[in-house]
Image (cartoon, rainbow, N blue to C red):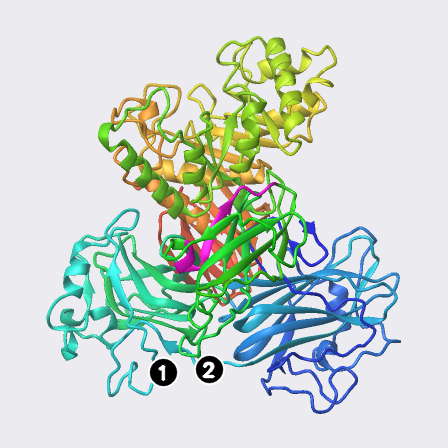
Amino acid sequence: MRFTKIGIALAGAFILLFSPLLSDRSEQSVHAAVEESLLSGNVIGGPLFPAGTAAVTTGASYRWLTEGVYATDPSVVASDPADAPKLSDGAIDEDDTGNVVTTPAGEAAYAALLYDLKSVYQVSSVAVWTDTAPDSAMSYYEVYASFDGLTYNQVGLQENVNTQGSGYVPVHLTLKPAVYAQYLKIIMHKAEGQQTMRLGEIAVYGKAAEPMSILSNNALRSSGYYNKSLPKLATGASYEWLTEAPFITDADLIKTDNDSKNDTVGGVPDLIDGSSTEADAASTANSTWGSKGKYGAVVFNLNDVYQIGKIDVWTNAADNNKFMDGYEVLVSTDGVNYNSLGYTQNASSRTANKIVNTPSYGVPGRNAKYVKIIMHNANDSQILTAGEVAVWGWRLYDAALPKQASPDQVPLTAELKNYSTVYLDWSGYNSVVNQVNKYGIYIETTPFTSTAGLKPKFTAEAKSVEQVGKYMPYVGLQPETTYYIAVTPFHTTAGERKDVEPLKLTTATVLGGEKAGDIFAVNDAPYGGGNYVHHGETEDLFLMNKLRLLRDLGGVNKNRWWDHSKAMKELYGKSGVNFHYFYHGPGYVKADNEGGAYTFSTYNEPDLANRDPAAAAAVIKANHESLKSVSANSLLVEPALAGVDRLAPNKGLNWLDAFYNSDGQNGALVKTYFDVMDVHPYIKYEYPAVPGLDQGAPEKLLELLAQLKETMVSHGDGDKPVIITEIGWSTYTGGSFLKKVDRATQRNYLARAYMHAIASGVRTMHWYNFADDGLDAGNLEHNLGLIDWNGRPKESYYGFYTMIRVLSEAKYVSALSEVANPYYGYRFWDENKNRYITALWDASWQTTSTSSRTASLATTDPGVAVVGIDGGQRYVAASAGVVQVPLTGAPVFIYSTGEPTVQSIQ
């Protein structure tokens, strides 16, 4: 993570909101801004909140969070009595020690609490009082917001720049724009150089929110669930079923939705006809029989941008043959770039024999004009039935207000995907009232308060996707660099408003590592490699389809290629993907850096090519010096070994030994010639199998990576980061150096390999490759892809999609100590979900003909949500503190607020 004067940008995909600090303040009270009221239930009448302080009686309360990677230090919990909470008592006794975090200087420590406002409000600011005594300091705090207490979004982050010795003073964060929220999670970080962090009070400000309204144009009836008393905005919303990959809606779902019966409400289609208790096929949309594991995907166009609050999805739970097990919601302001709000499991009984609602909730700060809902039919359900779907939310602005002669400033949020890619969002801006039809995007490395004399990095022209959606990805940031970013409005007649309050953020390192999702990458030449079969006249159409499917995955950070094409940098950059290139001299580096590329390689599998290790070391040394002379932040990644073994005298790790030893000093010099270790640890036929597992299973990767690390350590290079630029399994008919696998096994192996790599400390892993190179079933290279040669997703594509949804924002915690071969498991923590994610599988399971095992896990939760790499979802209720989860070779991801423990697998 990186620190700034105005705020802090963590090395991950977070919403970042910064505002001017109330710094060096001697007074202890904070006066709320215009129209703000106190929401957090603090006692009024004391020095912090004098009598007459505007407040809303919310009944708010807070509790300390004791789970996760930012679990509250026990000393804080012990010092804050539940029956007399100190952080809302409205007073700070300077002689009191307050809520104290005490750890040895230099150690990280946290205090994380969860405020429940008891209802949804518009939250506009937060203040945290902290002691500034010489031995005490809070470094910064983060604010996450939620509607349901399950899914959060980081809506603010503020550094403490108060002068030491000022007593207890507030660190104030203004949220621009204000966010709708019921739950606020506030994580306070102790300054690493201090012994303690003392906290005095926390206040949340805002105002009442109007009730949620229906946005999706559902018909309202005189009675029933969707009746005419409900608030509804006249959005004119419409929807359409998706018929393109990756989520192709069954034709019968579309056909039965558009029939002429439709519940006697004038031909309104079934999804918005206002009925929630449909009793016959005429009032529902139904897939064809045999739709096991299939999807129904629909996109609502709301015609303007709103804050989404809730989504109702009504489906049939009549019997085991009709059951939607869960769905995903994605939101977008421009219809191109979507953000996933996560999966929602259907917790209803499969024998409920009625239409049931499985509601989910929006995420504060995730605005939408387009709402995509992807329903999944259970893998053993014959028919997917869709009843009513209703999207609820709030208006972000009133376009009917009087027009302004001078436009307001543009409030902006920014989301860092990786070191080079940032997503900018100003979708809450009222362009109609402000009479704005164009925006300037300014990105500078020095502070500015006016854009006079500056050139915009991009101009969102009238009617462009960026101007209409008020959202855009920008690629080309430098790693470990502080940026100041602002968006300016262009009035239709008055021109550009140039005064700005820039957002400030700092990018991550090239290799990241803050999140598990930093590892996700592919190796797929845009126009193919040596084994590639060209598509002829449709090649460009295939490329664009491939890019769309790559973008839809949502979490791939990097691709590997040799051609420094500017056009490809721009095309892939729009999908948030940058390149790892082969190094072709310093002349390419500046343009490559500007396109987001900061990693380069000299060779590909030099051991397989029988290259002399000493000669290779000399070339790599020269390239390293050349690269660093023009770009200090760029990394040379070497040597891309073809194997991680010692089966042949001049290959794999034996070649690597010779490479290190070529300096005559056991690698003391050679290790300085490159920055990152690169290997291709394919699980080859010739490798002995892990005991009890199939030959070629990805669990072998743990052994191979351990051997690699041992070799690096023996040459004094054990601290060097490791990446993998090639790995994969082929769905071919066999005969080459890799075991043949079916499509489901390829999917399972992909997920397991990525998790083993994460646990082994690998920073980036490029799956080879994204698309099949041809149609020859017997050709290994023609069958390594996640999509086939015709552009159709394979099972591995959907597995990658699910894994990205589950792990992209999560932090790796540990391997499960209570399981051993053939069972494997890892634990992660997702701050946005405020839950642990436990991955678990049976590596000895082979095919559907193999009996599955059942894992018994002890949990303090009433039940757990389970997402399978095979697309299946379920909610498993606990019985006597235990949940039963079936295991196969397809990993499952178990969501829980507490850490579950595997008791047995039988």
Q: Amino acid at mark 2?
A: Glu
Circles 2 and 1: CB distance less than 8 Å? yes
At x 36%, y 83%, the residue is 231
Residue 150: x %, y % from top left: 50, 66
> Furthest-front residue in view?
493
Q: Is residue 289 above or below residue 627?
A: below
Q: Sort mark 1 into few (<14), some (14-19) or many (20+) by Cα contacts within 10 Å.
A: some
**Circle 2 is placed at which residue position?**
210
Magenta segment, which residues?
466-478
User: Is residue 448 visible in the rendered structure shown here?
Assistant: yes
Task: Tell me the element at label 2.
Answer: loop
What residue type is disc 1 on?
Answer: Pro
Secondary structure of residue under mark 1: loop
**Would you say residue 148 sits in the magenta stretch?**
no
Q: In the image shown, does 139 or 811 lie closer to the viewer?
A: 139
Picture coordinates of residue 522 (x, y %)?
44, 35
**Considering only order in the chain, which callout, 1 or 2, is on the residue closer to the N terminus?**
2
> Which residue bears the numbered disc 1?
231
Residue reaching furthest to the left: 260
Quarter where residue 631 is shown: top right
